[in-house]
Amino acid sequence: MTAKYLFILLSPLLLATGCSKDEAEPPPGDPAKGKALIRDYGCGSCHAIPGIPGADGRTGPSLERIARRVYLAGVLPNTPSDMMRWIRAPEAIDPRTAMPNMGVSESDAHDITAYLYTLK
Ligand code: HEC
């Protein structure tokens, strides 16, 4: 019984430390290039993405305020390196995901990640 109450008291604290850790790790890459790349790759056909004209897809989740998310796709901690892994090969992380491998290069993934982390 005490353990349960302790958990309830501590869980907001755990979530808060999860968020501040992400902000301490600055994403590499160029957000302006990333913005153009997101358009070129067509991420907006499946995602609503603030700042990207025409990006209003509903197949995937909205990427609004993605920088503040604790988990990516419900399975990965939201860090720049895991964000890049997800963007480059989502099926390697979750074989059943509906997000396809878009053939994103490593340097493009850096720039896309930099843009996504401006969405706070
Ligand atoms: C064919 C549709 C489709 C396309 C195109 C697509 N995605 Fe996704 N994406 C998804 C789906 C569906 C999910 C949810 C995955 C899951 O939870 O398993 C997702 C999840 C994500 C997530 C995690 C979101 C969250 O709420 O945790 C990010 C970040 C992401 N996609 C970025 C991108 C980027 C960047 C591109 C372009 C390079 C892209 N996606 C292209 C369908 C797509």
Image: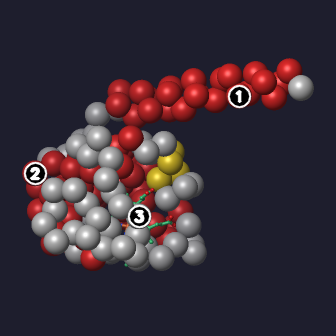
Picture quadrant of ligand 1: bottom left
Spatial CA distance of label 1 from label 2 is 41 Å
Q: Nearer the viewer, residue 53 or 89?
A: 53
Q: Position of residue 36 (x, y in %)?
A: 11, 62
Please rate how many residues cluster around mark 3, counting C-alpha atoms within 10 Å: few if below 14, some from 14 to 19, many from 20. Answer: few
- In the picture, the disc for residue 61 is 3
Q: Nearer the viewer, residue 52 or 25?
A: 52
Q: Is mark 3 within 8 Å of ligand 1?
A: yes
Task: State which mark lies toward you, 2 or 3.
Answer: 3
Q: Amino acid at mark 3?
A: Pro
Q: Residue at x 89, y 26 (%)?
A: 1
Q: Is residue 86 above or below residue 25?
A: below
Q: Amino acid at mark 2?
A: Ala
- In the picture, the disc for residue 69 is none
The residue labelled by disc 2 is 32
> Relative to residue 114, is residue 80 drawn left or right?
right
Chain-order first, disc 2 or disc 3:
2
SS for dot 2:
helix
Q: Amino acid at mark 1?
A: Ile
SS for dot 1:
helix
Q: Position of residue 62 (x, y in %)?
A: 35, 61
